[in-house]
Image: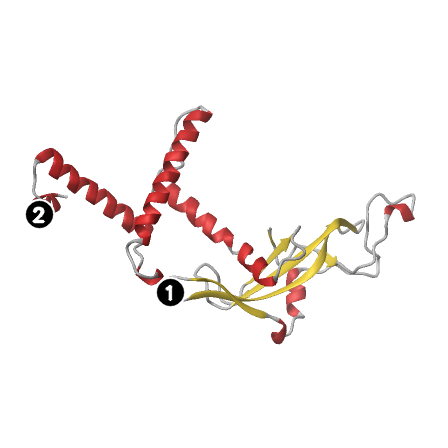
């Protein structure tokens, strides 16, 4: 889960907690008054240059997608006033970008909290944190180019059929896109492949329905 680098609060996993069973007036686990919660930005400010690990998680269209990462074990602060904390601990993953990704500003700090993956490697955490871009790109493509958000019906069956066809179309376009280049830098864009498919369909229609030869059909299309 991505969190705000400037406002998300936590304490170290090693912080000794005040438990409800230790006091009749305490309802939640709490951190001691002597402990000050931190934010991802504050932690990042204290990390030495040699403590960041550079990791490449994918091959981009122009250059490898990479960044510098750091992780540490934390416990989430629920409320600062009564100093309540979560029973659950997890990884805080930080990314100090250095220009390898098209959607980030150079040097911008990003932060994620990863629960339930205590034994995961740093490389695995990085890979999972970057899946969000792929998901967002998928939704952008099917909405802007394949009409995923244009269903006008009112039934679950209808919207299910509509989205099923949209996803089939998406898979078809992606496969055709993979066939357009020998490597990632040669791929046509999603929009370009759709235009190619539509044009080829028009050409085939002119050949089959109007009796045009291929050259004439290409001129008309």
- 81 to the left or right of 197: right
**Rendered view: 167 above or below 127:** above
Left or right of 186? Residue 218 is left
Residue reaching furthest bottom? 50
- Determine which residue is flagged by label 1: 62
Position of 121 with respect to 194 (left or right) is right
Callout 1 secondary element: loop
Count residues near mark 1 (Cα–Cα under 10 Å), then give few for <14, some for 14-19, many for 20+: few
Residue pictured at 20% horizontal, 44% vertical: 199
Above or below, 65 relative to 145: below
User: Considering depth in this image, is 111 or 171 the residue closer to the camera?
Assistant: 171
Q: Quadrant of the C terminus?
A: top left
Question: 5 or 61: which is nearer to us?
Answer: 61
Q: Which mark is residue 192?
A: none
Percent coordinates x, y for residue 5 in the rendering: 62, 58
What secondary structure is found at the residue carrying circle 2?
Answer: helix
Residue 64 is situated, as x and y percent measured from the top left of the image, at: 44, 66
At 91% from the left and 47% from the top, the residue drawn is: 23
Q: Is residue 31 above or below residue 48?
A: above
Q: CA distance from mark 1 to mark 2?
A: 36 Å
Q: Residue at x 63, y 72 (%)?
A: 51
Q: Nearer the viewer, residue 130 or 208?
A: 208
At 53% from the left edge and 58% from the top edge, which residue is drawn? 127
Point out the tag, 1 or 2, that comes first from the N-terminus.
1
Q: Which residue has dot 2 on it?
A: 215
């Amino acid at each position: 889960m991505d969190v705000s680098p400037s406002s998300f609060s936590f304490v170290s996993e090693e912080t000794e907690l005040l438990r409800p069973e230790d006091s009749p007036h305490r309802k939640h686990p709490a951190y001691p008054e002597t402990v000050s919660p931190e934010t991802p930005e504050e932690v990042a400010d204290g990390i030495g240059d040699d403590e960041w690990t550079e990791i490449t998680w994918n091959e981009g269209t122009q250059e490898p997608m990479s960044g510098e990462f750091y992780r540490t074990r934390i416990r989430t602060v629920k409320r600062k006033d009564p100093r309540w904390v979560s029973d659950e601990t997890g990884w805080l993953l930080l990314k100090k970008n250095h220009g390898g990704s098209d959607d980030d500003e150079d040097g911008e700090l990003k932060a994620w909290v990863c629960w339930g993956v205590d034994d995961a490697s740093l490389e695995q955490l990085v890979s999972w944190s970057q899946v969000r871009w792929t998901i967002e790109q998928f939704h952008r493509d099917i909405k802007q180019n394949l009409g995923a958000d244009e269903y006008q019906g009112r039934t679950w069956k209808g919207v299910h059929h509509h989205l099923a066809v949209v996803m089939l179309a998406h898979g078809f376009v992606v496969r055709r896109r993979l066939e357009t280049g020998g490597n990632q830098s040669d791929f046509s864009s999603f929009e370009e492949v759709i235009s190619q498919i539509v044009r080829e369909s028009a050409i085939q229609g002119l050949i089959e329905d109007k009796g045009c030869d291929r050259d004439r059909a290409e001129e008309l299309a």
